[in-house]
Amino acid sequence: QVQFVESGGGLVQPGGSLRLSCAASGSEFARVAMAWYHQAPGKQRELVARITSAGSPDYQDSVKGRFVISRDNAKNTLYLQMNSLRPEDTGTYFCNGVYWATNTIRGSWGQGTQVTVSS
């Protein structure tokens, strides 16, 4: 089964930027849609951005215009460029494969990477 390792989180001031990375194991990465999920403290995990295997992105309204999802299939890596960060973006970010029509996840959850937006 594909495994994911997220990295790139940290502490940033409001309005700042971070770039998250998700390294995937296995040979299926290039063929599956991928997504980033955000879990705020005390709340459920929610999908914030997803991308098809060919690179077409889709965003939740809360991050549209601020976040950019991308992927490098040759490196089995998914990215999330986070700009104009807000305190409500604080939380743990996870990546996973996703079935596009249903948003059902394809694999196991990794450890995630912590993002804290605070002055």
Image (cartoon, grey):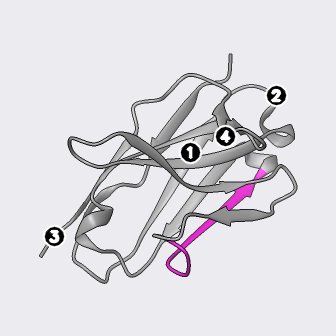
Residue at the (46%, 46%) spot, across then down? 46
The residue indicated by pointer 4 is 103
Mark whose residue sits in front, 4 or 1? 4
> Along the line of sight, which residue is nearer the eye, 93 or 58?
58
Is residue 57 depicted above or below 93 in this figure?
below
The residue indicated by pointer 2 is 27
> In the rendered structure, which disc, 4 or 3, sits on the residue that comes first in sequence?
4
Of helix, strand and loop, which mostly describes the magenta segment?
Answer: strand
Decide: marks 2, 4 in contact (CB < 8 A)?
no
The residue indicated by pointer 3 is 118
> In the rendered structure, which disc, 1 or 3, sits on the residue that comes first in sequence?
1
Q: Residue furthest top?
A: 1
Q: Few, some or many C-alpha atoms within 10 Å of disc 3 (few <14, some 14-19, many ≥20)? A: some
> Along the line of sight, which residue is nearer the eye, 25 or 33?
33
Residue 94, image x and y in percent?
47, 42
Residue 72, image x and y in percent?
75, 55
| Amino acid type of the residue tagged 3 in the rendering | Ser
- Tell me the quarter of the picture where residue 42 sits: top left
